[in-house]
Image (cartoon, rainbow, N blue to C red):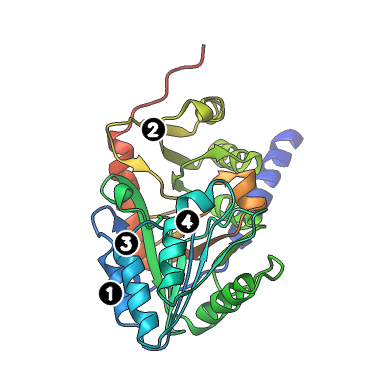
Amino acid sequence: MLAAVLVITLMMQVTNALASATVRTSTVSTIWTEPASGYGFVLAAINHARTSVELSMYELSDTAIEHALIDRAQRGVSVKVILNADYEGKSENEAAYDALRAGSVHVVWAPDNQIFHAKYMVVDDDTAYIGTGNFVPHDYSSTRDFWVADTQPSDVSAITATFNSDFAGGETTYQASGGLVWSPGSTNALVDLISLARQSLLIENEEMDSSPVEKALIAAARRGVDVSIVMTKDAEWTVALGQLAASGVHVRLLGASQIYIHAKVICADCTPDAGTVFIGSENFSTSSLDYNRELGIITSTRGAVQAVRTTVDVDFAIGASPAPRK
């Protein structure tokens, strides 16, 4: 009897701890689901810029976006761009860097010793666009990604301040606000969101190589949360995904002929009426969470929650279970 009472007490303590857990969120105004939405919204935002554009991008090879940035700069708009240099970044972005520099855009290379994997843009100091996708036309039609627009003044100000520090070559610090999730140092925010879930977790990510995230997912499944993960099949993640599946996590993998899962999203307790979702550039890897420059956002905005929930459900339905471990 004493043992039973102790178990019940411990379960109540865990439940109460989860119930009291919170994550900071931001309100987003719009969400775009790729590839269905396309990247016309990026061109429209740049073309309508009146005073400023700040862009931080891991990989840029979209000449239409480059030309739009150059056009704005030559019309007197302040246009600043940070391009990733590390991990083959200079070879990937050299053509864009040269074109922008020749076109009067203030463009700089990110530090050589740190991957700048963030994908975001701020226009006119009043709207921040935060996404999971690179500006690479070759990938647009075949890649699952998400973007959101954030117009909260405190968030936009924080992103702009961080951008300006990075642009000037300052230390890799960041300004916090609302539900913004910055790397380096985003592990706790994502683990906290996973730990908050009581009923369900819907997840898409390109990588699965973070011990704290994997442990949080396993813990969620073991406490009765319905955890579903969708990824593109890759032998590099076989062991990690096998351990997750063995712990009760529902894993579905998409093949080479299906849409490529490049999105990085977590949807906690998402229903038709509510939920909390993370959308950002952070992969589930030690490098991405602890060392890279990354940016994501946590929101409970219904439209964003529903877009992620519906999309991940569709992708999960067409995926295959991983082969059993031998």
State yes or no: discs 4 and 2 in contact (Cβ < 8 Å): no
Disc with the residue nearer the chain's start (4 vs 1): 1
Q: Secondary structure at mark 1?
A: helix
- Residue type beneath disc 2: Arg
Rendered image: mark on residue 19: none
The image shows residue 280 at horizontal and vertical percentages of 48, 58
Disc with the residue nearer the chain's start (2 vs 1): 1
- Mark nearest the camera among 3 and 2 is 3
Disc with the residue nearer the chain's start (4 vs 2): 4
Q: Secondary structure at mark 2?
A: strand
Determine the residue positioned at 56% across, 73% down. 178
- Residue type beneath disc 4: Glu
The image shows residue 292 at horizontal and vertical percentages of 62, 54
Rendered image: mark on residue 252: 2
Q: Quadrant of the N terminus?
A: top right
Rendered image: mark on residue 63: 3
Query: Disc 4 marks which residue?
Result: 94
Q: Is residue 42 left or right of residue 110?
A: left
Query: Disc 1 marks which residue?
Result: 44
- Mark nearest the camera among 4 and 1 is 4
- Between 278 and 66, which is closer to the camera in this rendering? 66
State yes or no: discs 4 and 1 in contact (Cβ < 8 Å): no
The image shows residue 311 at horizontal and vertical percentages of 30, 50
Mark 4 neighbour class, 10 Å CA radius: few under 14, some 14 to 19, many 20 or more: some
